[in-house]
Amino acid sequence: MEQNKPQTEQELTQQAAVRRQKLADLCEAGHNPFEITKYAQDAYSADLKNEFADLPAEAETGKIVSLAGRMMSKRIMGKASFAHLRDQKGDIQIFVKRDLLGDEAYAAFKKLDIGDIIGVKGEVFRTKMGEISVRISELTLLSKSLLPLPEKFHGLTDREARYRQRYVDLIMNPEVKDTFVKRSLILKEIRAYLDEKGFLEVDTPILTPFEIGASARPFYTHHNTLNMDMVLRIETELYLKRLIVGGMDRVYEVGRIFRNEGMDPKHNPEFTTIELYQAFTDFHGMMDLVEEMYKRLALKVCGSLEITYQGKQIDMGHWERLTMVEAVKKYSGVDFNDWKTDEDAIAAAKEHHVELPEVPTKGAILAEFFDAFVEDKLIQPTFIYDYPVEISPLAKRKPTDPAFTERFEYFIDCTEYGNAFSELNDPIDQKARFERQVAERKAIEPDCKAQVDYDYVNALEYGLPPTGGLGFGVDRLVMLLTDSASIRDVLLFPTMKPID
């Protein structure tokens, strides 16, 4: 059944049909719950439990509260019943007594279904069994649940359904909500950290006029008024660096990015990144910033620098720093410095069964060796720096060795988490690299629409100060700090294939 097609009466389960009849009866009696527009909620479950944590069993508080939320259980016991209400902060037991609520209201309560949204008013007390509860004196049905909640909505067999119906997943699995509460906390803490450092949060275009020469594949759309194709952005970098040219020395953007590429546990077609740029520093300054920020996040979100991710112990307090050449030599035994020509590198790749890149230069082959021998060894936080110029079109060359650039990526649990440069600010070099990149792309894909961003080159000609830049994926970071195995676990609504 299509997700957006309304259900017919024949498709409804017997329980759902019963619930619709209950709604019809309520409406006929003049009690349509969907006409209620607000409810005066003045307390939450977790706050009450904390406030009265030391209250002894069977003790009264005299505190009258109004709560609102979803009824998650109900036990009818003659003239008195118990239920559990789930609000924004958790669950709390409610005690419903006929003598206190009244015969008519108690009879109405007995007809309520699990999943109904209710408002209640009553006194907080602790039961004989020791549970903080609310003795109800008023109860209002605020919204009727027309579909029964599943008895179980967890486990691998239901994972696809959980992603497709995240609203049900959130109802049935409170720990899922905790993940997204932490996601919000992570973003809040990153913003606080960068704001304290003097960075300014900005917004740049999501719709861009053409496809740049990068390897990532974009999504295309069409603007009717301008009668032109446009592209959903694959990065925020070039616009942000235009702002550095304009004198905004520290900027960052929390940006939604779109790439028309594959999907797996670490990739979704739309995802969130943070890119930041700081004038008058370099990639070493960015390394220091990453290390300091990630330590702060680990302490804030996980309470420790020692975190657990998918059964592995990760020490966020210690970061190793290796050049790409050092890392490849350490884990493969192959020394880049022994290669005098591209042919030497090709021979080494064939000898070690390393896949050759589309353009088999020494630098590009070094990167393939890194992928084959190094990345899956980097469990603990590690900076890999000094990347070949062939794979770093936006990074500044190393003054001491122009075959390499002042670029790093950092890895945790065999996964790349971010990318940073000493930004290339030579407009002549940048133009040449862009043109070469586009030419190489079109040689491989003659029909591709990639273009050189000459306006960005023009901006550089006005003068970009020495600048350090960093980009990192928010979703992967949230996965790490919430111990989530898949990117779809940290996206409220991940991209899903439609149901036929």
Image: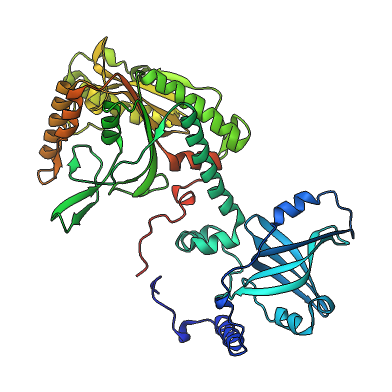
Decide: is 136 above or below 396.
Answer: below
Decide: is 340 above or below 419.
Answer: above
Instruction: Kindly tell me whether residue 50 is visible in this rendering.
Output: yes
Instruction: Kindly tell me whether residue 352 is visible in this rendering.
Output: no
Query: Looking at the image, what colour scheme do you see?
Result: rainbow
Tally of numbered discs: 0
Coordinates of residue 354 in the picture (x, y in percent): 28, 30
Q: Quadrant of the N terminus?
A: bottom left
Report which quarter residue 208 is drawn in. Answer: top left
Q: Quadrant of the C terminus?
A: bottom left
Coordinates of residue 478 in the picture (x, y in percent): 49, 42
Decide: is 172 above or below 108.
Answer: above
Report which quarter residue 367 is drawn in. Answer: top left
Q: Nearer the viewer, residue 50 or 294?
A: 50
Name the residue at the bottom extreme. Answer: 28
Q: Nearer the viewer, residue 402 or 180?
A: 180
Q: Which residue is drawn at the image coordinates 26% and 26% (left, top)?
A: 245
Side of 192 where 65 appears, left or right: right
Report which quarter residue 315 is drawn in. Answer: top right
Coordinates of residue 172 in the picture (x, y in percent): 59, 62
Side of 156 where 399 appears, left or right: left
Coordinates of residue 341 in the picture (x, y in percent): 17, 16
Side of 433 where 235 appears, left or right: right
Q: Which residue is drawn at the image coordinates 16% and 29% (left, top)?
A: 458
Side of 127 where 67 appears, left or right: left
